[in-house]
Image (cartoon, rainbow, N blue to C red):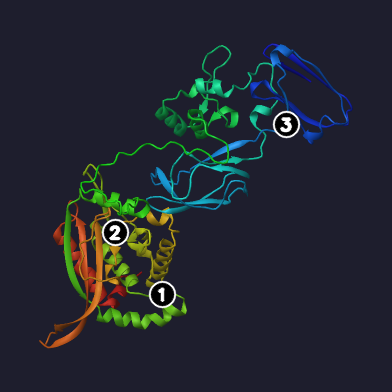
Amino acid sequence: YQRRVRGSIFCFAIGRSSLKMNRFSLLRNNKLCFIAKKPRSFFKSNFKLFFEINKRTLNRSFHLGTFPKALTEFNMTDIGEGIAEVEILKWFIKPGDVIKEFDPLCEVMSDKATVQITSKYNGKIIGLYHKEGDIAKVGLPLMKIDTFEEPDNLSPLSPKQNLPRTTDERSLSHSIRSKQGTPVKVLASPAVRHLAAKQGINLSMIEGKGKDGRIRKEDILNSTSEYLIETNLATPEIEPITYIEPSIPIAESDTVIPLRGYRRAMAQTMTESLSVPHLLYAEEITMDNLMIARKTLKPLAESHNIKLTYMPFIIKAVSLSLKKFPILNSTIDKNLTQITLKQSHNVSIAVDTPNGLTVPNIKNVQNLNIFEIAKELSRISENAQSNKISPEDLAGGTISLSNIGAIGGIFLKPILLVPQVCIGAIGRIQKVPRFDSRGEVVPVHLMGVSWSCDHRVVDGASVARFCQTFKGFLEEPVSMLSELK
């Protein structure tokens, strides 16, 4: 067997052909690695080994060992929706655990949803970059995994191939050049080229680890920094955040709570909503007939394991009203040049959770009946409470409702969920005295409802007519039947 290293020839002769040797290979710093099925007993029996070596070149740098670990950095997955960072809620694994593809690794929470991250590899966890509660950047490493695969640097070297560079040589430059010193033509996707341009890296200077030498995102990230591979790994550097000094000094006894997850999303959304002029409209709705209709349908709903509240009726009444006034189910572009009328009635429902307010939505309410809406309402509410709401449930809302009456209160000024142009707040139902058509005082059940609209899109007359249509459906629930197909 023969290798050429820096002008010197290595010759190896092995006696007793019954010995099955996997491979000879040169490691970094010119150490020779003999790889066999039983490396510890390699020199004790069954063969003779003769070396004819240039000792000046090697300087006695032989080493007996097994395959080096095929370490892979598992980067934080891009979960979409423009999310740049997430909070690590819970680890399902620890260093030393053996994992398989699709095994759950951790649970993370972004500004919009809680997502479970699964493994793309089979292997063993070498170390974690983050603790529970840390913020992880999308695209940067979460952990180190030994994938049990043979590294590329153990494949036989052809005479024209260069030796792998040492760590010191690697730190001097990100470039990989041909023997003539000219940049090598590379393969890379548009996303990888964008990342390289953002990092200020010349793609022709990066060694691609993908198929046919294709450069991946991991190759770009790995070329920009060296990470530790021990069990206790260093946390990747996170860009510093500049904080404004509070006007009120913080005492030692005060508690500082990081603004993360749903609360952070609410802070960002409400700040964005400040730029939108709000139009407020409020009304009272008599609920006596709807209470009778719900009482009639409740046993039937229970027979189908459905929890029937007033909200499914309210949500359906909103959808039926939007058919007559589609301007309230629209969005306006940032340049204020066009309005888009949405065909789907995706009604967002504000849900109060231990981690803050989240607003999932029920898709295509215009195609659902009361019982189907009740099922979806129960599903998204349960998932929100258990931090299992999906990004799909949060995306695509066209109009919002907040049932503040479940806690208390009659009227509320709701804040728009931009880019939506309408949001309604439902107050509690209360029994109050009112005059009937004969002038007699009678007890009635009233519910307060408040609407906030984007006054750049919706005028007062439109929201008033919309609300009166909505009120008519709830005060005479049988009238909804005339609108159903």
The answer to whether residue 45 is above or below residue 436 is above
Using the numbered discs, state the Cα–Cα distance from disc 2 to disc 1 in whole angstroms.
23 Å
Q: State the count of labels.
A: 3
Q: Tag 3: residue type?
A: Gly
The answer to whether residue 424 is above or below residue 211 is below
Res 279 seen here: yes
Res 359 seen here: no
Q: Is residue 90 left or right of residue 396?
A: right
Which quadrant would the N terminus be assigned to in this image? top right
Mark before the other along the chain sequence, 2 or 1: 1
Label 1 vs label 3, nearer the camera? 3
The residue that mark 2 highlights is 399
Mark before the other along the chain sequence, 1 or 3: 3
Residue 344 sits in quarter: bottom left
**Residue sitting at x 45%, y 32%:** 190
Q: Give the crowd class for mark 1: few <14, some 14-19, many >=20 residues within 10 Å.
A: some
The answer to whether residue 61 is above or below residue 93 is above
The residue that mark 3 highlights is 65
